[in-house]
Amino acid sequence: MRSPAAAAWRIYRGAPLPVRLHVLVRALTCPLGALLARFPAAGAALDVGCGHGLLAHLAARDPRRPRLFLAGIDHDAGKIRAARAVGGSRVRFWALPLEALPAAAFDFVSIVDVLYTVRREAWPGLLAGCRRVLRPGGVLLLKEVIDRPRWKHRAILLQETISVRLLGITRGDPPHFESPAGYAHALRQAGFSPFEGSPLASGHWISHYLILARRP
Ligand SMILES: C[S@@+](CC[C@H](N)C(=O)[O-])C[C@H]1O[C@@H](n2cnc3c(N)ncnc32)[C@H](O)[C@@H]1O
C-alpha cells in the first residue's frame, strides 16, 4: 500500500481543497499506518468519531483486507457528508449516535483522537457505547495523544485549543490530554480488558499512544 499521505491525497482528489488539505495534514501527523496494521483482516469494523472518514477509507481500500467492511460515525454531519462524497464500496458513514447502532454488531471498533475533545464526565457513556456495539471478544483500538513529555503536551494543547476553540475545525469540548494510565483506567471502568499499550513513533511534537482492549 502507498503511504497514508499519498493515499489520502488520491482518495480525496474530488473533495473540496480544504477537506483534501485537512486529511493530508492528518495523514502526515498521525501514525495511520501503525493503526491500520492493527485492523482485522475480515469482519465488520466501526470508526467512532471518524471525522472526514480518512481511517475508514484507507482501511476499506487496503488490499490486505479484502473482506473487511467499514463504517464510520460522527456527530458532525458536515464531516460525514464529506466522508460519504468520497465513495467506496466497502465503507459506510452515518451522522448517528452510537445508541442508534445495533448491539454486538462489530468485530472491531476504533476511536482515534476523540476522547480529548470530550469532557471527562462524558467518557463513560461514550466508552459504554463502544462496548455495546462490539461483539463479545471484539477489540477496541483507542489512540490518543498523551500528556507527556511536558513540552509536547504544551505544544499539542496550544494547537488543539486553536483548532477546537478558535477555528472550530473540531466540534467538541475544550481539549484535554491524559496519561496512558488514565486512558487504560477509563477503559477498565467501561468494562474493557486492555491488553496492549504502546507509544507510537512520531518524529514531531505529538506524543501518540495506542491502547488495544478486548470486550470480555
Ligand atoms: C480530532 S477529530 C478526529 C477525527 C478522526 N477520528 C481522525 O482521527 O482523523 C475528533 C472527531 O470526533 C468527533 N466527535 C467528538 N465527540 C463525538 C461524539 N460524542 N460522537 C461522535 N463523534 C464525536 C468530532 O466531530 C471530530 O470529528
Image (cartoon, rainbow, N blue to C red):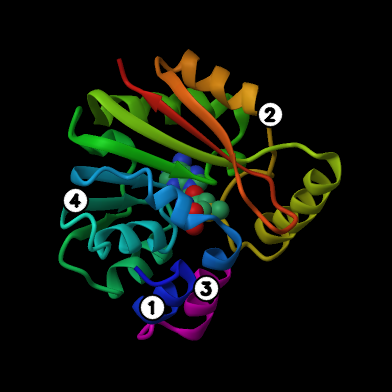
Q: Residues within 10 Å of mark 1 (few under 14, many from 20)?
A: many
Residue position for label 3? 24
Expressed as whole percent of the image width and height from the top left, the position of residue 25 reads 58, 70
Query: Residue at label 1?
Result: 12
Of the image marks 4 and 2, the number of the one nearer the N terminus: 4
Q: Position of residue 132 (x, y in %)?
A: 28, 25
Q: How many numbered callouts? A: 4
Q: Specify the amino acid type for callout 1.
A: Tyr
* Among numbered discs 3 and 1, the one appearing first in the sequence: 1
Q: Kindly identify which residue carries mark 2.
A: 179
Q: Report the Cα–Cα distance between label 3 and label 2.
A: 27 Å
Q: Is residue 140 magenta?
A: no
Picture quadrant where residue 129 is located? top left
Q: CA distance from mark 4 to mark 3?
A: 24 Å
Q: Is residue 120 above or below residue 160?
A: above
Which residue is found at the position 44% from the left and 22% from the top? 195
Foreground: 151 or 198?
Answer: 198
- Quick one: label 1 or label 4, which is nearer the N terminus? 1
